[in-house]
Amino acid sequence: MTFDVEKNLSAALIGLEKIDMRNMPVPELGPFDVLVNVKVTGICGSDVHFFKHNRILHLEVTEPLVLGHESAGVVVAIGSQVTRVNVNDRVAIEPGVTCRTCEMCKSGQYNLCPHCKFAATPPTHGTLCNYYVHPEDFIFKLPDDISLEEGALVEPLSVGMYAVERANVKPGDVVLVLGAGPVGLLTCAAAKAAGAAQVIIADLIPSRLEFAKTYATDTQLLLDRPEKGEPNFEYARRTSTQIIQKLGQQADTVLDCTGAETCVQMAVLLTKSGGSAVLVGLGATTQTLPVVDITVRQVNVKGVFRYCNVSPVSIVRAYPRAISMLTKGNIDVKPLITHTYPIEKSQEALLHATNGSDGAIKIQVINDQ
Ligand SMILES: [Zn+2]
Ligand SMILES: [Zn+2]
């Protein structure tokens, strides 16, 4: 395969809602590295957040930053020691490269590695580019029957599958998911695949619930917006009471995929005594929680950060597990792709994802070069 790393068209974030399509240098290929010609990149909520605010929590974009971390592509070159993939292989890129030696990495909880370099998290550039250099142990070959578009959805699918794993969802469970974006929907799909008897989704946006009707959910709940001046917790209490009345019960597990304080509070209130409220979304650093519910009803509040091995004792990682769910047809990610843009129009793709209340679920950027 011929390729020219001098032509590395990349979507660099250079200011508030401002992308510059520029040629970025491609790092040198180390002995264990793989050079991937990136073909498909999904736009994620974190890309949108960086695009809109140029920061997430303490992570600030101070220099041009290439966005994107949900990618799949074709291998165009491999380092001298690479054995797991070959040139022309179609692959998914796992975007967080960990140190492999710290206590967390050694225990399998590599999502907690303090030295992790994650694509499109400053100062590490993302994958919304033509060529991306990445170590082979974070590159996964896609089976022939899995498209590159599906391969680019392995990243958010891994988030959903790991969240359900952390929640310990069991066959027959009632599972409630807050937030009907891609991660919320993939969490529903993972809960179904884990045997949940009833999967309920809740959101404020009607078009998202319309979509959810066709995807991995049994019940869709439209949340009212808070009344003017209504304190967060009063809203959470009022809305939770309405939902419990409507459902006739609380859920065994509630997974919050929004990070919004009211939803985190609702996650606790909507969980059965002894059940789990799992926090998948990332919101404000400090939030108020209904602590008495957590204590006297023994609600297990669990955090979820990205994804890692199935459990600390397993060596099976998130990506191969997610890929096998696609291959076996247990989860279908294709319906989530509602819009595509060519890489040259990355700015438009990000604007669409930022302002999208038109039923857009997953927007992907396609690179034909
Ligand atoms: Zn993401
Ligand atoms: Zn580590």
Image (cartoon, rainbow, N blue to C red):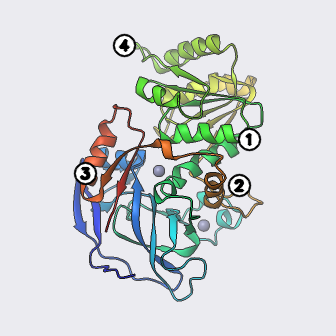
Of marks 3 and 4, the one in the foreground: 3
Q: Quadrant of the C terminus?
A: bottom left
Name the residue that disc number 2 marks.
310
Amino acid under disc 3: Gln
Q: In which quarter of the image is the N terminus?
A: bottom left
Give 258 or 322, whichever is nearer the viewer: 322
Identify the mark nearer the N-term, 4 or 1.
Answer: 1
Mark 2 C-beta closer than 8 Å to ligand 2? no
Q: What amino acid is found at the position of numbered circle 2 in the picture?
A: Val
Q: Distance between the residues labelled 3 and 4?
A: 34 Å
- Tell me where residue 275 sits by quadrant: top right
Q: Is residue 202 above or below residue 337?
A: above
Instruction: Count neighbours of disc 3 (C-alpha within 10 A) and say few if under 14, some if 14 to 19, many if 20 or more.
Output: many
Q: What's the mark number on residue 168?
A: 1
What residue appears at the point 58 percent right and 17 percent down from the top-left corner? 240
Point out residue 262 in the picture as x, y percentages from the top left corner.
50, 25
Q: Is residue 252 left or right of residue 1?
A: right
- Front position in the image: 203 or 74: 74
Q: Which of marks 3 and 4 is nearer the N terminus?
A: 4
Pick the residue in front: 361 or 310. Answer: 361
Question: How far is disc 1 from disc 3 in space, using C-alphas?
Answer: 39 Å
Q: Mark 3 points at which residue?
A: 347
Name the amino acid type tagged 4. Answer: Lys
Residue type at mark 1 is Asn
